[in-house]
Amino acid sequence: MVVDTISDFLVSNNYTKKFIAIDYGLKHIGMAISDPSNIISVPYGTFTETLLFEKIIEIITIENVHGVVIGKPYHLDGSLSEMVNKVEIFAKKLEKIISCPILFIDERLSSKPYKSRKNSENTNIHEKSACLIPELAIKFKKSKKRILGKKTKNIFNLFLEPSTRTTISFELAAKNLGYNSVNINFEKSSLSKGETFNDTMDTLMSMKPDALVIRDKNNFSPMNIAKKSNVPVINAGDGTNEHPTQALLDYCVIKEIFKKKKIKIGICGDIKHSRVAHSNIKLLSKMGYQIHIIAPTYFLNRNELIKINDKIKFHKNLNYLEKLDVLMMLRVQKERIPKGAKNMMKSFKKEFCLQNNHLLNKPYLMHPGPVNRNIEISDEVLDNYPKSLILKQVEMGVYLRMACLHYILK
């Protein structure tokens, strides 16, 4: 019989019995054997469909197997692949010749080793995570039920740069899941007394948190921490490098509106110093969107962007743009710009501050915040533009970070 949920499958399986995992491919079908206590199934072999039926019956008898899990093929954007019909027909045939339960699972869940998901993957965006986490975030947003974890978890939030939206959203996310949130900032930490960063990390990790959320001015510090620890590390922004959860929540907001439509997205402003821009360009390119970059040469490293996506279209100003579906403005990173660059700021304000006349095609407007009023966006646009998604981004931040914590701690 085909069961509907993992819990139904495990109940019928008494939570402890072995099961067969099936990966239905174009030419061959892969099979592995596992049990609920294993992290990764042990590969058994690849077969044609006819031989596989015989092999499954043989293994059920010899290995005392009590269930079959079949991967249901999805595309990265969450749509079902053309292989689904074949897989469902295969399951119906199998159901007629075996008596143990059969469960379909999202194939994207099963192809990444657990340790990698727990560590390095959370400092950058892996393609499968980039689909599963936003889907979970949108489900959390739609659900009126409070989602509580089965066990109490301790989440350490270490923010070594200023933050309002990210700090509060991670704290709310943890509390909404029933977890403890411990906030640590520079002024109240031993770092302000001269303790080294590595010694502070060793101290925090010795307290055995279930996850560490970190924002730091130094590029790659979350990744370096993750390499040295078994504790899941979530990058809440590292220098000019990356801000993965911001990109994921931006993708969530876009996905809610446009569903699976592949749209044109403009990203405008200080691309060079913006970790938000770097993560968004990588993620949105992976998702098949057409990316338009609008920036002055002094805020742009064109060659680096072409390495990420050689189909990016570049524009020197906000005038005469192709019709964009979304325009994402960026904060000018004043703290990362040379102190003697006043002329640069004046020039940017004059040429790139968003005005109503730039919005004649009525794109949706996004900005990661905080906004430097009348430098990136004029007061008139910020306060009155009807298709602004800026506060929607803030709202989605809580659900997206709930999804991140739930994903790595489940």
Image (cartoon, rainbow, N blue to C red):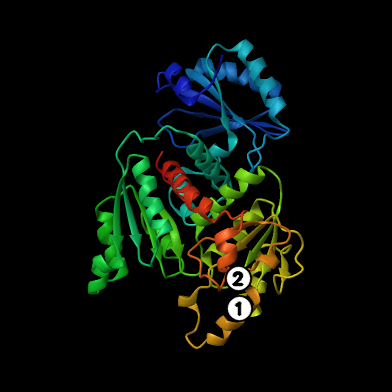
| Residue 214: quarter of image | bottom left
- Residue 333 visible? The answer is yes
Q: Residue at x 51, y 56 (%)?
A: 246
The reply to whether the C-beta atoms of the residues labelled 1 and 2 are less than 8 Å apart is yes
Residue 232 can be seen, yes or no: no
Q: Nearer the viewer, mark 1 or mark 2?
A: 1
Residue located 73% across and 59% down the image: 361
Residue 69 or residue 7, whichever sits in front: 7
Which circle marks residue 348 in the picture? 1
* Residue type indicated by callout 1: Phe
On screen, residue 379 above or below 249: below
The type of residue carrying mark 2 is: Gly
Residue 293 image position (x, y, % from top left)? 67, 67
Where does the image place residue 272, in percent across and percent down from the top left? 58, 73
Describe the element under mark 2 as helix, strand or loop.
loop
Q: Is residue 365 left or right of residue 149?
A: right
Question: Which quadrant is the C terminus positioned in?
Answer: top left
Give x and y (percent) for residue 52.
65, 23
Q: Is residue 205 left or right of residue 105?
A: left
Q: Secondary structure at mark 1?
A: helix
Is residue 276 placed above or below 401 in the rendered structure? below
Residue 382 found in image quarter: bottom right
- Residue under the image location 31 percent in, 68 percent down: 197
Q: For label 1, count other residues whose C-alpha is less than 10 Å away and answer few (under 14), some (14-19) or many (20+).
A: many
Residue hosting label 2 = 269
Give how far apart the Cα atoms at labels 1 and 2 are: 8 Å
Could you say where residue 315 lies in the image, as x and y percent from the top left?
72, 71
- Asked whether 306 or 373 is in front, the reply is 373
